[in-house]
Amino acid sequence: MLPESNAAPGYMYDECKATADWLLSQLSMRPLVGIVCGSGLGGLADSLKNQVVFKYSDIPNFPKSTVHGHAGRLVFGTLKGTSCVCMQGRFHLYEGYPVQKITLPIRVFNLMGVETVILTNAAGGLNQDYRVGDVMIIKDHINMPGFAGINPLAGPNEDRFGVRFPCMSDAYNRKLVRLAHEVGAELGFDEFLREGVYCMLGGPSFETIAECRMLNKLGADAVGMSTVHEVIVARHCGMRVFAMSLISNRSVMDYESEERANHEEVLQTGDDRAKQLEVFVATFVSRLGHASNGTH
Ligand SMILES: O=P(O)(O)O[C@@H]1C[C@H](O)[C@@H](CO)O1
């Protein structure tokens, strides 16, 4: 165990517990499902019923959202009778927060009783068969910052959350991947539903053409700037994970191309698919089969 002074802010158990207790003291429910909304996908949170809403700026220890398209609100409520908490906006490495701080909400989810985490993001499509507006169920990831030692679990291990060396070969729950395909087929979403590998980079600059070509050769189907650290922390503390990427733009792979990645297109694609994603997530959540409904 390293000295306590090596612990990164936003990382330790007591700080996460204080935040979870503060939230629970103001709620008459405990969430079973935690949802993280990606860029342009915050509308998912608006579909929750019986909402109780907290601004991130009012929550002890919470970082502040700084990115357009990330509202910065924690929304509690129910989706088809299942109690949920929804992050309407997430935190990214490029905002300047330590990697431990951007994942603090995931540990707070765990301490509030969340069992299943659903993560969404907007991503560039590296796979040349993908089209803008496709939704990629994430089956695996490449943690590019992790290759340089940027991992939310670096530092002293907090045994009350999980083990020092957590396995990641089962990071994305395979039963939930199958459930997502079933739900997608029932809703008639097959046409735009894909399954693939998400690669996370630090951002905020979008990728060069050479980087996109390399990532695609390495086996990545989509590239983005989030999600992976949240998944690692969620799996460390034993929550099951489902994640999906909205392909908001095609990664530029060709020097002749006039296409340019930009955040406005990312947000617009989110708007265009918003309603279908809301229906998808609500139906998916209703089929998760939690033992209780989270009321206490
Ligand atoms: O939070 P996500 O991963 O959805 O946000 C993506 C990555 C960047 O933050 C931004 C680029 O447009 O969208």
Image: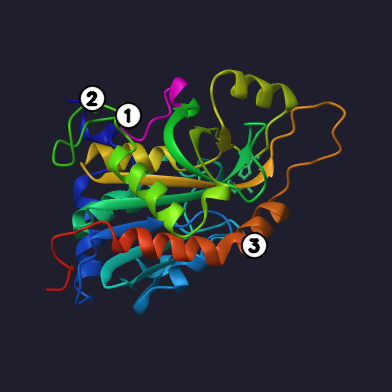
Q: Which mark is residue 165?
A: 2
Q: Residue at x 65, y 34 (%)?
A: 129
Q: Residue at x 64, y 19 (%)?
A: 214
- Label 3, label 1: how many angstroms apart (C-alpha)? 38 Å
Q: Amino acid at mark 2?
A: Phe
| Front position among marks 3 and 1 | 3
| Front position among marks 3 and 2 | 3
Which segment did they paint magenta?
146-153
Q: Residues within 10 Å of mark 2 (few under 14, many from 20)?
A: few
Q: Earlier in the sequence, mark 3 or mark 2?
A: 2
Q: Is residue 207 above or below residue 12?
A: above
Q: Position of residue 188 (x, y in %)?
A: 51, 57
Residue at mark 3: 272
Q: Residue at x 38, y 30 (%)?
A: 151
**Residue 270 falls inside the magenta stretch:** no
Q: Which mark is residue 154?
A: 1
Q: Residue at x 18, y 41 (%)?
A: 161
